[in-house]
Amino acid sequence: MKARLYEKYQKEVVPALKQKHNYKNVHQIPKLVKIVVNMGINASLEKGAMDDAAKDLTLITGRKPAISKSKKAVAQFKLRENQPIGCRVTLRQDAMYEFFDRLVASALPRIRDFRGLSPRKFDGRGNYTFGIAEQSIFPEIELEKVKRTQGMDITIVTTAGDNAHAHDLLKLMGFPFAEK
């Protein structure tokens, strides 16, 4: 069974985008490619910090994260070579649509004083990246078990060629942008 948001994309978003931008070919219509969730960990924290972050990211995304390690040592940052410095998960297809749905419907509205995300965080190629200050906005995380608050970066990659088409796609998918 396909994700609920994918069915909305097929039935509502594709016809609306096709009508608005006058696409001649179905393959020109922008779509979501992947969502990357990244948590950077301070290298000077204790050893269990990486395990806690990986466990939280597993609960949030439903996938086991890949651990990122430092490529070289930097003495000023107290960083050694091959030291774990973060974890990331790449979501595609059904898992991506399910995560996007949970993010928009339940997680983002739980942010205190939330008035929408800035529409200026596109990268010029139709990809949108934003940061979240703490992982506790996700309903999967139990607040009693959180040892330290951990932020994360979320990147939504689309096939749109420019920011305007990607903005229209995400807006029609229900993404909460702040009004100008």
Image (cartoon, helix red, strand yellow):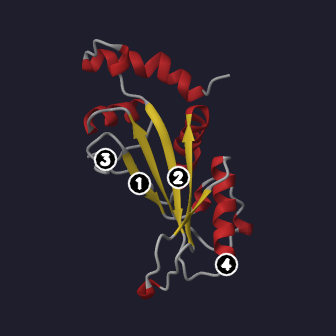
Res 143 quadrant in image: bottom right
The amino acid type, in three-letter code, at marker 1 is: Phe
Q: How many residues crowd around disc 2 within 10 Å: few (fewer than 14), some, or many (20 or more)?
A: many
- Residue 178 located left or right of residue 137: left
Task: Name which residue lies at 55% across and 83% down.
Answer: 44
Question: Is label 1 or label 4 in front?
Answer: 4
Nearer to us: label 2 or label 4: 4
Against 38, residue 35 (above or below) is: above
Location of mark 4 (residue): 47
Q: Amino acid at mark 4?
A: Lys
Residues at circles 1 and 4 in contact by the CB criterion of under 8 Å: no
Amino acid type, mark 3: Phe
Contact, CB < 8 Å: mark 3 with mark 4? no
- The residue shown at (32%, 39%) is 126
Label 1 or label 2, whichever comes before in sequence order: 2
Instruction: Locate the N terminus by quadrant.
Output: top right
What residue is shown with label 1?
A: 130
**Residue 23: quarter of image:** top left
Nearest to N terminus: mark 3 or mark 4? 4
* Residue 37 image label: 2
Q: Decide if residue 120 is on the left or right side of residue 79.
A: left
Q: Is residue 139 visible?
A: no
State the image coordinates of residue 166 (x, y, percent, origin top left).
33, 35
| Residue, disc 3 | 122
Q: Residues within 10 Å of mark 4 (few under 14, many from 20)?
A: few
Between 174 and 76, which is closer to the camera in this rendering?
76
Give the Cα distance between marks 3 and 4.
Answer: 35 Å
**Label 2 secondary element:** strand
Q: Give the mark toward the camera: 1 or 2.
A: 2
Lower position in the chain sequence, tag 2 or tag 4? 2
